[in-house]
Image: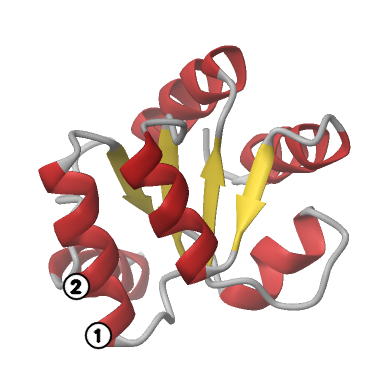
Amino acid sequence: MKHPKEVFQLLGMAARARKLITGEELVIKEVRAGNARIVIVSEDASKNTLKKINDKCDFYNVEKHVFGSRDALGHAIGKESRVVLALTDTGFAGKLSGLLNEYNRGWANDEDTCTRIREKSESDE
């Protein structure tokens, strides 16, 4: 998958189905409650936000991906810019996980290297 269009479409469907939580504090609350199935953090999130979400997801064993800009994520769900999203539905989360793993194939998926590696590989093309 060269274009992330399918990921954004799936996020839009999840938002319309009301299976999506947005906002740092609400996402952390859902992760703690065990309702979050997958968390997405924008590539332009602050280091503090990224660390907080990363720590919570690691502790509660929730899958986390760094993907898209805050404006692109917000646009995909029909809202203003969003930095953190969480899916609460197992079906949507499974499909999204597959798409994101395919999109990020071969790239490290942690707070520092994901964006840096992607920028490097795109500049090499």
Q: Which mark is residue 68?
A: none
Q: Position of residue 85 (x, y in %)?
A: 55, 54
Label 2 sits on a secondary structure element that is: helix
The quadrant holding residue 77 is bottom right
Q: Residue at x 88, y 59 (%)?
A: 78
Residue for badge 2: 51
User: Residue 66: horizontal and vertical position, in percent?
Assistant: 36, 58
Give whichever of 79, 23 is nearer the camera.
23
Please give left or right for residue 66 compared with residue 56 in the image. Answer: right
**Callout 1: SS:** helix
Q: Residue at x 61, y 21 (%)?
A: 92
The residue lying at 53 percent from left, 28 percent from top is 96
- Identified by mark 1, the residue type is Lys
- Give the vertical position of 107 relative to 25 (above or below): above
Give left or right: position of 31 versus 40: left
Q: Of residues 65 and 85, which is closer to you in this image?
A: 85
Give the Cα distance between marks 2 and 1: 6 Å
Q: Which mark is residue 47?
A: 1
Residue 60 visible to the viewer = yes
Q: Residue at x 43, y 29 (%)?
A: 37
Q: Quadrant of the C terminus?
A: bottom left
Please, what is the three-letter code of the amino acid marked with disc 2?
Answer: Lys
Cβ–Cβ below 8 Å for labels 2 and 1? yes
In the image, taking residue 30 as reference, residue 92 lies left or right, namely right
